Every structure is written in structure tokens, then in C-alpha cells.
Image (tube, rainbow, N blue to C red):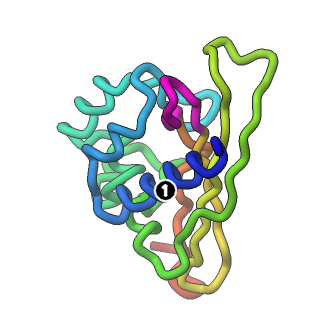
């Protein structure tokens, strides 16, 4: 049952990206924990809202690649989750529920792998991690931003 709920939540997250719906996205975020990768800055839901208002780094990674140029290269992607979610074939690839002994916050954890096809037909995957709190799955972050998608073989853009 929880695995089906996690898949449904993953589908809602993907749709929020397609629609560039920041309100739905924020409703799916854990109130105290959201980050990019294990070493990334932790954002509370309130901090994410502020980030979205000024369109800083996290907003750019999630919803609008046009502001990514404001972040320092070369580690920044050239596309956002919103843009890749609109591609044909973008979907929830798999869900997994897991726990670890070292998790400090109570609750079960899980992950949703999203997949999409880039313009030159390679498949890319990104993982969002979730925590089960108050009988709901809430995302606590993602492993890496979508990578720059090559247009043909030209990578010098």
C-alpha cells in the first residue's frame, strides 16, 4: 500500500514539474528537509518559498533553466526538472521503499526514479528521496539536477 502511495506521490511531483506548479511542489516537500544531494544545503519549506520568490539556484534547478546562468558554472545544469518533465517519455520509472539504521528522523524512507529521453535518444534518470510522515510521502530532496542535454553532438553551448 505505501509503495502505491509513493508512486502516486511521484506522479504528482512529475505533474507539478510539467505544470511549473510551485504550490503543488511545495505541498509535496517535507516541511523541514529538502536538499540537492547528500552534501547540499538543507532548505525548509519556508526557505524554498523565499527561494522561489527571488528565483535563486534551487528554483532554477527545479522550474526555470533560464535563471541557471546566474549560478556559477561549471557544475550547474542547463535544464530544469520542469523542462525535462515535459519531454515525451518522461515518467516515473520505479519506486522503492527503504530504511536505514542511521536515519535520525523517524519514519520510513523511499525513492522515486524519474526517467526521460534526451534529444539524442539516451535515457537519463534522476532520483527523488521521500520520507513517510503523518501518513503522507514528502520529498526531502534529489540526488542531482538534470544534466545538460546535448543538442545533437554540439556540447559547446
Closer to the camera in the image, 2 or 30: 2
Closer to the camera in the image, 115 or 65: 115
Residue range of the region highlighted in magenta in the rendering: 130-140
Q: Residue furthest right?
A: 101
Regarding residue 140, the answer to whether it shows in the image is yes
Q: Which residue is mark 1?
A: 77
Reply yes or no: does residue 132 show up in magenta. Answer: yes
Which secondary structure lies at badge 1? loop
Q: Is residue 98 above or below residue 43?
A: below
User: Image point 64% across, 30% down: which residue?
Assistant: 38
Closer to the camera in the image, 122 or 16: 16
Determine whether, in the image, residue 154 is placed left or right of residue 103: left
Count of numbered circles in the view: 1
User: Image point 53% across, 72% down: which residue?
Assistant: 90
Position of the C terminus, as image quadrant, is bottom left
Reply yes or no: does residue 35 show up in magenta. Answer: no
Amino acid at each position: 500500500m505505501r509503495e502505491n502511495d509513493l508512486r502516486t506521490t511521484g506522479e504528482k511531483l512529475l505533474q507539478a514539474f510539467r505544470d511549473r506548479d510551485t504550490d503543488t511542489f511545495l505541498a509535496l516537500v517535507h516541511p523541514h528537509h529538502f536538499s540537492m544531494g547528500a552534501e547540499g544545503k538543507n532548505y525548509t519549506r519556508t526557505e524554498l518559498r523565499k527561494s522561489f520568490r527571488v528565483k535563486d539556484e534551487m528554483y532554477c534547478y527545479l522550474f526555470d533553466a533560464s535563471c541557471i546562468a546566474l549560478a556559477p558554472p561549471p557544475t550547474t545544469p542547463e535544464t530544469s526538472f520542469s523542462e525535462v518533465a515535459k519531454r515525451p517519455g518522461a515518467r516515473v520509472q520505479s519506486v522503492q521503499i527503504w530504511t536505514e539504521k542511521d536515519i535520525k528522523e523517524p519514519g520510513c524512507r523511499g525513492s522515486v526514479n524519474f526517467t526521460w529521453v534526451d534529444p539524442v535518444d539516451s535515457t537519463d534518470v534522476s532520483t527523488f528521496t521521500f520520507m513517510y510522515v503523518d501518513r503522507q510521502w514528502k520529498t526531502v530532496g534529489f540526488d542531482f539536477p538534470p544534466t545538460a542535454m546535448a543538442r545533437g553532438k554540439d556540447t559547446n553551448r
